Amino acid sequence: MKQYVGLNASQKETSVCVVDATGKLVFQGKANSDPGCLDGAAAQACAPR
């Protein structure tokens, strides 16, 4: 299943939004603007539901 990710980054915090091919919201959250934190948010967004 295709998923699309949108990021809204600032120096301190990045908003993450994931939608599927139909536009249905799959995940929405925020993480510190740090590669490790963003990796954790991506892993959470991609976890099986």
Image: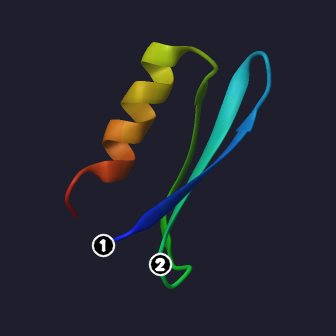
* Above or below 12: residue 22: below
Q: Earlier in the sequence, mark 2 or mark 1?
A: 1
Circle 2 residues within 10 Å: few <14, some 14–19, many ≥20: few
Q: Residue at x 38, y 28 (%)?
A: 40
Q: Residue at x 41, y 27 (%)?
A: 39
Which colour style is shown? rainbow
Give coordinates of residue 49: x percent, y percent: 22, 64
Give coordinates of residue 9: x percent, y percent: 74, 31
Relative side of 49 to 16, left or right: left
Asked which quadrant contains residue 16, the reply is: top right
Q: Residue at x 44, y 35 (%)?
A: 41
Relative side of 12 to 19, left or right: right
Give coordinates of residue 33: x percent, y percent: 64, 19
Q: Are marks 2 and 1 in contact (CB under 8 Å)?
A: yes
Asked which quadrant contains residue 8, the reply is: top right
The circle drawn on residue 21 is 2
Circle 1 residues within 10 Å: few <14, some 14–19, many ≥20: few
As measured in the structure, the alpha-carbon distance from the residue carrying label 2 to the one carrying label 1 is: 7 Å
Quarter of the figure with the N terminus: bottom left
> Circle 1 sits on which residue?
1
Q: Nearer the viewer, residue 46 or 4?
A: 4
The circle drawn on residue 13 is none
Relative side of 28 to 11, left or right: left
Q: Secondary structure at mark 1?
A: loop
Q: Secondary structure at mark 2?
A: loop
Q: Residue at x 32, y 38 (%)?
A: 43
Specify the amino acid type for callout 2.
Ala
* Above or below 8: residue 36: above
Specify the amino acid type for callout 1.
Met
Residue that lies at the very extreme toward the right in this rendered image:
10
